[in-house]
Image (cartoon, rainbow, N blue to C red):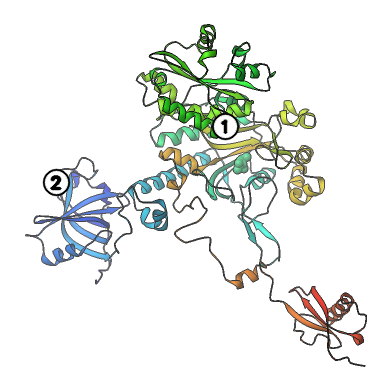
Amino acid sequence: MKLDRLGDFQRTHRNGDLRLDHAGQTVRLLGWCRRVRNLGSLVFLDLRDRWGLVQLVANEETADPELLAKLKAVRSEFVLAAEGVVAERESKNPNLATGDIEIRLTGLRILNTAAPLPFPLEDEGVGEDLRLTYRFLDLRRERLQRNMQLRSEVANLTRNHFRELDFIDVETPILTKSTPEGARDYLVPSRVHAGEFFALPQSPQLFKQLLQVSGFERYVQICRCFRDEDLRADRQPEFTQIDIEMSFVRQEDVQGVIEPLMVKLAKVIGQDVTAPFPRLPYRDAMAWYGSDKPDLRCGVKIQEVTDLFAASGFNLFRAAAESQGQRRVRALFFPGEAAGSLSRKALDAYQEQARQMGAGGLPYAKWGKDGLSSSFKKFLDEGAEAALKDHFRASGEGLMVFAVGTDAQTSKVLGDLRTKIAADLAPMEKDPSLSTLFQDKNAFAFLWVVDFPLLEWSEEAQRFVACHHPFTSPHPDDLDLLETDPGRCRALAYDLVLNGFEVGGGSIRIHDAETQSRMFRLIGIGEAEAQAKFGFLLDALAFGAPPHGGLALGLDRLVMLLAGVDNIREVIAFPKTAQARCLMTDAPGPVDERQLRELHLVPDARQTYRVGAVFFESAEDGVDPVKRGELRGQALQQIGQLTPRQAQGLVTLDPQGQILDAQSISGPTFDF
Ligand code: ASP
């Protein structure tokens, strides 16, 4: 098809902006054909640009034949320039912003054709692999356009927010140094320095701290970070952080610049949130919600009931009561009719879920229309039942589920089931006050989890590792515990949590070299290693580092929650799959051997030289004569001969001229 040229065609309006007020005006528009329909003598075409959709129309009986012919040649996704007059529609479309009007076509240019699409853009059921392979088309969908627009707004709002607060935006390197701790690095081999590697930053952590030492008191950067981890729905190998660092601050000061930003961001999607957000110590988060990122949209709390079973006939529970705190009985209570009438099948499914999380089962007690049913009913006499109900202030119908074990085991099981059961019950419950207790889907529940432990014991490494990172300051009240009981030492670390997701985390940092060295020792990094890996940081801390702290927000995750989607890939223009692959470009991919050789990732073709009577017969340039003499001597020694008279040898050198192999070979003996 012969294409028209854009020439001097200029759009007068964005498609989505046209309204009844424009009736009578001649407009020029640009965009893609979403679809063409022939209805009797009328031909309709929906024209889409970034700002919306508008209907174009031509009447077969009155339109210019050339225009009509062109219009009939148009297929979905052709690129068009259209001219026409805005007119009120006869049948209006209330679902479309431009639904009151249409454009009576007077001219049309076909700027480009489009092959039939691999999937219709309106089809929401297309497999994700196909969508990601043709991501440039997938991104034409209205939903993704909206997500990307939201992401852009979040980024702009964030930049403005921090600019108003006098933060300075500083870029930090992408090619940097691999440091121990943290996740697995993405490495970049150095061509210039054989056998050495850059690492892509897991975060600009050390650079932003060094910037504080340099005097950039309020730093911000929207930066890309890279971690080679196993992926989940809310993780990508490269992701974006809103990264800040401040000097002379306490944790409230850092939280104090983040909260108003969250209020502004929530407002973008029409959510009103109020600051300050609740602060919850880590210990309470684990005890009440079984999670360090509790979803506070659900108000149901885990309660300890061990003591109620001290004299119970139910061995499992009594044994826990007798274990002197080693094991506990903990429970959740969901009040209401929906919980009281849960089916056996539903309870079995929760039971199975508890088993998958390592529990032996999920003992329950349920009060329904027909009274009590329980997996340990014969041990629940009236007194015990009353004590339980009293403990939970339970009257009427409801469900109680129990877990027995260590704090960690029971927190895991009940923490997960808490939100799962609540989310199942919320839509079933008729009493509206209970559905908000279970899960108010529309709420935005922010909180800070504070007082994290500084260290945790790693079974795998058989040593303590930093919970947040090794630059986090111990809680000043717990400094004495550092060497005596490190596991109990709290950190000045805080996470920002939204609806069960960690959206950010940060800490007040260690700002003196001595405490930093103590910390390194605690996590098994000795003096020499600390100097080799973190010498620059220790130096910097010794040259007048101010007290400082900061935080990083996960931009992708935040936008995911604001957009109301449950997959981070929906808010990233060109994401990787869960297998860390880009299906569109097919990265990662192989590279050619020459590149590998340049990067010293495969050994160079070996060079073979003769030693002995015929010295370096095949020596090529690159090995200088002095070196050649040395090598000859070494090679002869390796093959156990001292003088060239007695032997000939073959020596194989690597590209740096080091001997890889030397061996005797038979051949004529020369007598000099
Ligand atoms: N760099 C940290 C992280 O990426 C955040 C911080 O401590 O500021 O988790």
Instruction: Residue at 10%, 61% (x, y): give it.
Output: 63
Instruction: Residue at 46%, 32% (x, y): give it.
Output: 263
Q: Is residue 126 left or right of residue 53?
A: right
For the N terminus, the quadrant is: bottom left
> Given contact means CB atoms under 8 Å apart, are the residues at marks 2 and 1 in contact?
no
SS for callout 1: helix
Placement of 24 over or under 316, stated as above or below: below
Could you tell me the amino acid type at mark 1?
Gln
Give the residue pinned by disc 1: 255
Q: Residues within 10 Å of mark 2 (few under 14, many from 20)?
A: some
Placement of 349 over or under 627, stated as above or below: above
How many numbered tags mark residues here?
Answer: 2
Asked if the residue at label 2 sits under 8 Å from ligand 1, the reply is: no
**x and y, in percent, of residue 639 in the image:** 87, 77
Q: Is residue 284 left or right of residue 425?
A: right
Could you tell me the amino acid type at mark 2?
Arg
Q: Is residue 152 left or right of residue 4?
A: right
Point out the tag, 2 or 1, that comes first from the N-terminus: 2
Q: Residues within 10 Å of mark 1 (few under 14, many from 20)?
A: some
Q: Kindly tell me whether residue 218 is visible in this rendering.
A: no
Give the residue pinned by disc 2: 89
Q: Quadrant of ligand 1?
A: top right
For the C terminus, the quadrant is: bottom right
